[in-house]
Amino acid sequence: MNQKMHAFPDLTFRLPEWVASVMPLADHVFRDDEEKMRLAVMLAKENVRHDTGGPFGAAIFDRDTGRLIAPGVNIVVPAHWSGGHAEMVALALAQQNLKTHDLGGDGMPFCELFTSVEPCAMCLGAVPWSGVRRLVCGARDEDARKVGFDEGPKPDNWIDEMEQRDISVTRNVLREEAAGVLREYAEGGKPIYNARQRRSESN
Amino acid sequence: MNQKMHAFPDLTFRLPEWVASVMPLADHVFRDDEEKMRLAVMLAKENVRHDTGGPFGAAIFDRDTGRLIAPGVNIVVPAHWSGGHAEMVALALAQQNLKTHDLGGDGMPFCELFTSVEPCAMCLGAVPWSGVRRLVCGARDEDARKVGFDEGPKPDNWIDEMEQRDISVTRNVLREEAAGVLREYAEGGKPIYNARQRRSESN
């Protein structure tokens, strides 16, 4: 026993099985921001209904073809991965699909990240590293905070910070529908699982 | 072809093979902050030497036993994963090992995250969700920026934001050694791979 070596497992994460079954065909062309956001919001809703994670969905599209590159849902609790937010999952899947860490690199399509709720501090920090060039959000930060989710320490000027990095930001696309998924989740008594709640909020 | 369905791969990430070979035995007791940070800095250095990623290392320890829970190195480029920063890898591995998304949950050890460089915006956002209760940093944000790494949009009061969430922050442990790894990396002409550089820095 004294000679026991450390061994570290692979990290393997996957989308819930139901996701593939609710996707459109691979050649489906998404026409506009609303149709793209509708997919992200549907993913959030179905994730709650299947009890496979938190009320958050995301998807990455090729702006020029209108095709889906990768979906994402929150898999934090079932995957044992606090980094498993919908945006992080969608970004990682898109990067695996396109075999690059930089979706904005040479030869890559113009990638747009749609998310059913404005990104938390972690996901916001992840966006510039990912190479996506456009971020489109449904529900607002305050909609998430209203039902008890801590969005984390974000700089006040985050939109400007994105635009400084040539990432455009569009907000409030299907905000009501996306916020509705958050409300239903909270009203259903499902866990609001922030690990380290701010003292000022938890007291 | 018109009926082609979307299929999404598993996400599988792993530490470079050399990591296990440089780890101490599983029952090794780390005595103090410097010894713990020395492991994180060694991981950063070896990661550069083996050409398996960027000059960043991290490790998670059980404060009460002094044992290593999980190491991490930056695997961004080889793994095709912009989220593959050392801290994110170490956190995800610790959570897999302990089978929980919340390292601060009931029955968990008191987890400390050591990182060879102050976390970027993404990793900083990830810390509160992970459940670690202490963050210990080597090189400073400005040491990383000095060699060209964009640390992303972090709130100015990030230390206070951590402490508000009962996460204590210690900085400047082996700062010089950790900053030295960054300098060697940059002087070696290795890629500084920020996907979306701030215009004000890249112009």
Image: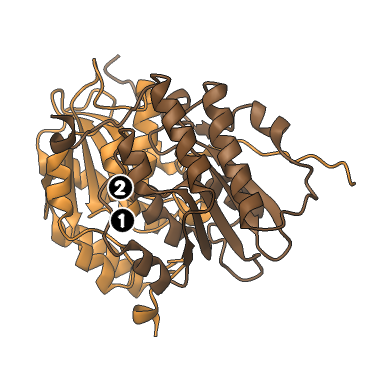
Chain colours: A orange, B brown
In the foreground, B98 or A116: B98
- Residue at (71, 38) in percent of width and height: B23
Percent across and percent down for residue A178 are 21, 58
Specify whether A180 is left or right of A193. left
Q: Residues within 10 Å of mark 2 (few under 14, many from 20)?
A: many
Whole-percent x and y of residue A171? Answer: 12, 52
**In the picture provided, is B157 more to the left or to the right than A20?**
left
Residue sitting at 42 percent across and 66 percent down?
A: A194
Tell me if label 1 and label 2 are in contact, CB under 8 Å.
yes
Instruction: Read off the residue under disc 2.
Output: A125
Task: Point out the residue furthest to the bottom here.
Answer: A203
Give the quarter of the figure containing the C terminus of chain B. Answer: top left
Q: Residue at x 33, y 74 (%)?
A: A187
Secondary structure of the residue carrying numbered label 1: helix
Residue at 11 percent across and 41 percent down: it is A33
Q: Position of residue A61 (x, y in %)?
A: 22, 32
Q: Quadrant of residue A118?
A: bottom left
